[in-house]
Amino acid sequence: MLTSISRLLLLSIGLLLATMAQGSEAIKTCAITIIFNPQNETHQSVQQALNNGLQQEQNTRCLITAIDYTHNQKQTITRNQDLVVSIGSKASEWAINKVNQSPLLAIMVSSEKYKSLSTRFPGQLSAIVIDQPIARYYQLIKASMPDIQHVNTVFGSHSRKRKPEMVEQAKNYAIKLHSYTLSTHDTVLDALNRIMTKYNSVLLTLPDPAVINRRSIRSILLHAYHKNTPVFGFSSNYVRAGAIAAVFTTPDQFGREAADEIILRADNKQFSSTQMKYPSRYDIKTNTRVIKSMNLVLPSLAEIRKRMRAQP
């Protein structure tokens, strides 16, 4: 006959074994390959944030293999990877040609690039794109300058597909969108003159190399400044160049977004996806020097963030 102490000991051992079993079942494992350029500071930041995000998750353990695509042109990716993550367009192009049946998550690529690559890798390509949701641009404008009712923008070959959404979303923020779509014969300054002479309010620039590039960026900002037209943009570099404000996702935030996505897929035991996502994390930046020189008064960064979060 078991004594009360023996019964208690057996019960404790049973509870311990049950807890250990539950704990082992709760931990998810995965094999991840990251394709990036370690000489690129942005890629380094993304990769480090991704690694940190996975390490901080107690219930997911990932075996991570990193590949420098710039020095491994002949290397292939092993078949036993649960997910391949590529950072940027060039890494994604490389991965498309090297991946062996494993699903691919491309991060920091444009929505247009994702659509182009998905035709070459059907059923296995997903993305967290570098574009921001249209509503987020309007939220930034309204949070910064609440009285704005007219917004000007120029569409190029990449961004023109977003025009219907931009027109529709503008209604939710009591904004009238005035736009011009570039043809092969137009210059960006010609387009700006056509819309800014009519509606001299604010200029919203979108990430489109046909409109915003190294040759045009300075001319656009100077033209808008001389027209006393505040410019809202899509990158911190654009703000440093002369835009009054921008909304964008930082490399660190992209890394955390990717880590969250990997953890979610590991929890669901489903790594394949064809979904394109906008980043949920974002940051904003303002150029106080340009704001002051244009005699504008904008809220603080903290207040702009608060107002953006409060908008639909």
Image (spheres, grey):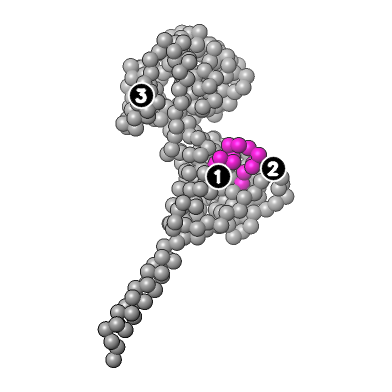
| Closer-to-camera residue (123/9) | 9
Q: What segment is highlighted magenta in the picture?
A: 35-46
Which of the two labelled residues, at mark 3 and mark 1, occupies the earlier sequence position?
1
Q: Is residue 233 above or below residue 39?
A: above
| Closer-to-camera residue (27/149) | 27
| Closer-to-camera residue (244/3) | 3
Q: Residue furthest bottom?
A: 1
Quadrant location of residue 20? bottom left
- SS at mark 2? loop
Looking at the rendered structure, which numbered label has been put on residue 143? Answer: 3
Residues under labels 1 and 2: Cα distance?
18 Å
Which of the two labelled residues, at mark 1 and mark 2, occupies the earlier sequence position?
1
Residue 274, percent from left and from top: 49, 47
Residue 32, percent from left and from top: 56, 54
Contact between labelled residues 2 and 1, with CB atoms less than 8 Å apart: no
Contact between labelled residues 1 and 3, with CB atoms less than 8 Å apart: no
Residue at the (48%, 23%) spot, across then down: 233
Residue at the (56%, 48%) spot, across then down: 85
**Label 3 crowd bin: few (<14), some (14–19), many (20+), radius 10 Å:** many
- SS at mark 1? helix
| Residue denoted by label 1 | 48
Which of the two labelled residues, at mark 2 and mark 3, occupies the earlier sequence position?
2
Nearer the camera: disc 3 or disc 1: 1
Residue 166, percent from left and from top: 42, 27
- How many marks on residues? 3
Q: Residue furthest left?
A: 4
Q: Which amino acid, mark 3? A: Ala
Contact between labelled residues 3 and 2, with CB atoms less than 8 Å apart: no
| Residue denoted by label 2 | 70
Q: Residue furthest front?
A: 5
